[in-house]
């Protein structure tokens, strides 16, 4: 199966599972669509990248539960001063994007009232309800997308039905009356801002929110999509990201201010890398087996520019030793992209689903996004160039 076919199947599978869960729970507020999408991405590459698939799968299914607050309180961020919620409150910690947008709007209520949890307990997945009909419907969807081989490709050590049951329990965020924490917040008709929608605390609070309340979601790595929205081959995000749920993003929120008195030399070529040892993305080029081959090709091209190159390893990288062996002779560090961004004369991204791409574009750093095929000649969008690995050396020399 080609990468494009894999990407199309990932989109369709993720969409079908989202619709199934949405119809069952009645709202996206009651299930973790981020984790469901992650599992869909894993399923999609199971037959292609079996070793890493099982590594990631074992880490996910071995988790016994998630932290869950027994109660919540509303405080002014950082100061910790109690603040009565008026009109709007923010669920969990702010992000750069949420602070930027809410400050621009002068939304004092959302900036001042932050809902946080305390008196946490460990909610065991085994205690969470698992509707048998939902498991059966998931099994039917697997058959549609994977045919007769789906059981051998997807089955884990716990057995297929138990495996699907675990997924339902991990993604189910619907709460019982006894678990509700909103009795401690008198005004239940608030509107809510959610800077970190994938966070488990945010998921739990969202599931408590009264149905009539409005929820604003911020930031989902899509701030840069409009820059190259006509790039049809790459524009294959599942509907859960673009249609069913609207995330507010502003690329200007990633703009960084230079510290006064410090003059940075723009002499580095930064190459932010994929979180190797993970197959939790569905975009066409965002998977471990593709990125491993891509890194080999990028490394060979970068030999000529070695003294300027810094490979920025993703903090979530699991196979650090393997990547270190591949990068022998090059400088590499973990989680340093933001630290060196303003010293970069060029940023080279090997996959689209990274905030590093958005940050580089926002800070007007010349940026290259590599892609596989579908790009006969480089495409340019302001300071962003999209090209293939075969065009990379020319584009580097051109930017010098």
Image (cartoon, grey):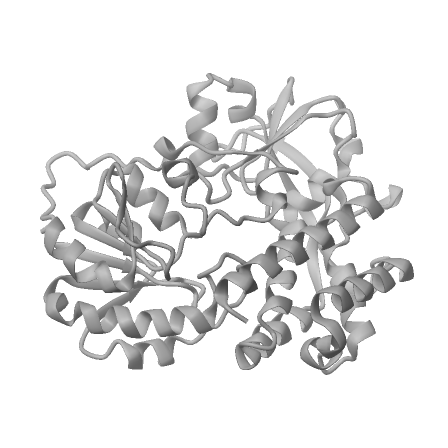
Residue 146 shown left or right of residue 6 in the figure: right
Residue 265 shown left or right of residue 226 in the figure: left
Question: How many marks on residues?
Answer: 0
6 or 227: nearer the viewer? 6
Residue 398 shown left or right of residue 33 in the figure: left
Which quadrant, please, contains the N terminus?
A: bottom right
196 or 10: nearer the viewer? 10
Residue 353 shown left or right of residue 50 in the figure: left
Q: For residue 361, which quarter of the picture?
A: top left
Q: Residue at x 62, y 37 (%)?
A: 243
Asked if residue 384 is positioned above or below residue 274 in the image, the reply reads above
Q: For residue 169, which quarter of the picture?
A: bottom right
Q: Residue at x 46, y 45 (%)?
A: 221
Asked if residue 44 is positioned above or below residue 348 in the image, the reply reads below
Inspect this view and state whether residue 175 appears. no
Q: Position of residue 121 (x, y in %)?
A: 72, 55
Q: Position of residue 213 (x, y in %)?
A: 73, 25
Asked if residue 199 is positioned above or below residue 215 in the image, the reply reads below
Furthest residue toward right: 132
154 or 144: nearer the viewer? 144
243 or 305: nearer the viewer? 243
Q: Residue at x 61, y 74 (%)?
A: 46
Inspect this view and state whether residue 1 appears. yes
């Amino acid at each position: 199966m080609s990468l494009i076919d894999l990407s199309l199947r990932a989109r369709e599978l993720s969409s079908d599972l989202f619709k199934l869960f949405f119809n069952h729970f009645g709202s996206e507020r009651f299930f973790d669509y981020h984790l469901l999408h992650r599992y869909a991405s894993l399923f999609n590459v199971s037959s292609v990248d079996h070793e890493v698939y099982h590594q990631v799968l074992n880490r996910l299914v071995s988790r016994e539960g998630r932290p869950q607050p027994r109660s919540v309180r509303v405080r002014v961020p950082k100061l910790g001063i109690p603040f009565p919620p008026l009109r709007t409150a923010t669920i969990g910690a702010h992000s750069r994007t949420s602070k930027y947008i809410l400050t621009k709007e002068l939304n004092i209520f959302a900036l001042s009232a932050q809902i946080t949890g305390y008196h946490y307990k460990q909610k065991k997945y085994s205690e969470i309800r698992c509707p048998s009909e939902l498991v059966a419907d998931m099994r039917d969807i697997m058959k549609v997308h994977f045919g007769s081989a789906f059981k051998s490709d997807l089955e884990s050590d716990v057995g297929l039905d138990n495996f699907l049951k675990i997924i339902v329990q991990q993604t189910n965020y619907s709460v019982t009356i006894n678990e509700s924490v909103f009795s401690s917040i008198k005004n239940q008709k608030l509107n809510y801002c959610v800077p970190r929608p994938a966070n488990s605390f945010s998921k739990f609070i969202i599931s408590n929110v009264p149905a009539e309340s409005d929820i604003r979601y911020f930031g989902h790595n899509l701030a840069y999509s409009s820059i190259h929205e006509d790039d049809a081959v790459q524009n294959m995000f599942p509907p859960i990201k673009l249609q069913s749920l609207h995330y507010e993003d502003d690329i200007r929120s990633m703009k960084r201010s230079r510290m006064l008195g410090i003059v940075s030399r723009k002499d580095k070529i930064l190459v932010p890398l994929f979180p190797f040892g993970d197959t939790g993305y569905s975009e066409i080029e965002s998977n471990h087996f593709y990125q491993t081959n891509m890194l080999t090709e990028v490394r060979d091209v970068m030999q000529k520019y070695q003294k300027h190159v810094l490979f920025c390893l993703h903090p979530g990288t699991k196979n650090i030793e393997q990547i270190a062996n591949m990068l022998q002779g090059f400088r590499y560090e973990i989680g340093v992209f933001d630290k060196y961004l303003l010293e970069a004369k060029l940023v080279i991204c090997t996959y689209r689903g990274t905030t590093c791409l958005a940050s580089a574009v926002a800070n007007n750093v010349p940026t290259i996004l590599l892609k596989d095929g579908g790009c006969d000649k480089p495409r340019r969008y302001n300071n962003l160039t999209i090209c293939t690995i075969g065009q990379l050396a020319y584009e580097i020399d051109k930017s010098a």
